[in-house]
Amino acid sequence: MITKKGIDVSEHQGFINWEKVKSEIDFAFIRITYGKKGIDKFGKRNIEECIKYNIPFGVYVYSYALNLSDAIAEATYFLNQIEPYKNYISLPLVIDMEDADHYKQNNGYPSNEMLCEICKVECDMFENMGY
């Protein structure tokens, strides 16, 4: 069995030494945005370092969407941020649908059905943009 090692990174990991990390991993998933207007302060740097060191990567949005309108705005913002890197992204686009900071809990947690619809709308948008 072949095992691949990957990491999930965001600004919470701070300034990453990608030259050192490249020998320890096979791929990375990089947070680019959160919600409709939040941008990960190291997201673009992390992409550029993965490109520089030839590390396969995917990107993700940490979702704060509570309804379909939020989902459309969130996905649009995310897609706009990654557009310059479209030809370098070799792994899937991902929606991080969790509630680690209790935003959804504190703002009217959507039903499971709505969360699925939010994911479907965003994934359809990703596919329509060629991802």
Image (spheres, rainbow, N blue to C red):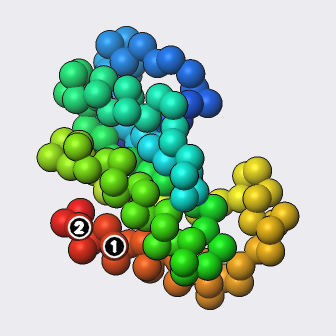
**Contact flag, marks 1 and 2 (Cβ < 8 Å):** yes
Q: Quarter of the image holding residue 11?
A: top right
Q: Quarter of the image holding residue 22?
A: top left
Q: Secondary structure at mark 1?
A: helix
Q: Position of residue 8 (x, y in %)?
A: 49, 39
Q: Which residue is mark 1?
A: 125
Task: Name the residue at 29% across, 28% down.
Answer: 48
How many other residues sit within 10 Å of disc 1, few (<14), some (14-19) or many (≥20)? some
Residue that protrudes farthest toward the right in the picture: 106
Count of marks overlaid on the render: 2
Kindly identify the amino acid type of the residue bearing the numbered disc 1: Met
Q: Secondary structure at mark 2?
A: loop
100 in relation to 111, above or below: above
Q: Is residue 23 visible?
A: yes
Kindly identify the amino acid type of the residue bearing the numbered disc 2: Met
Q: Which residue is mark 2?
A: 129
Q: Is residue 6 visible?
A: no
Task: Name the residue at 21% across, 22% down.
Answer: 52
Task: Kindly report the distance in space between the C-alpha atoms of the residues bearing marks 1 and 2.
Answer: 6 Å
Q: Quadrant of the C terminus?
A: bottom left
Task: Name the residue at 54% across, 58% down.
Answer: 36
**Residue situated in front as seen by the camera: 20 or 47:** 47
Q: Position of residue 43 (x, y in %)?
A: 43, 35
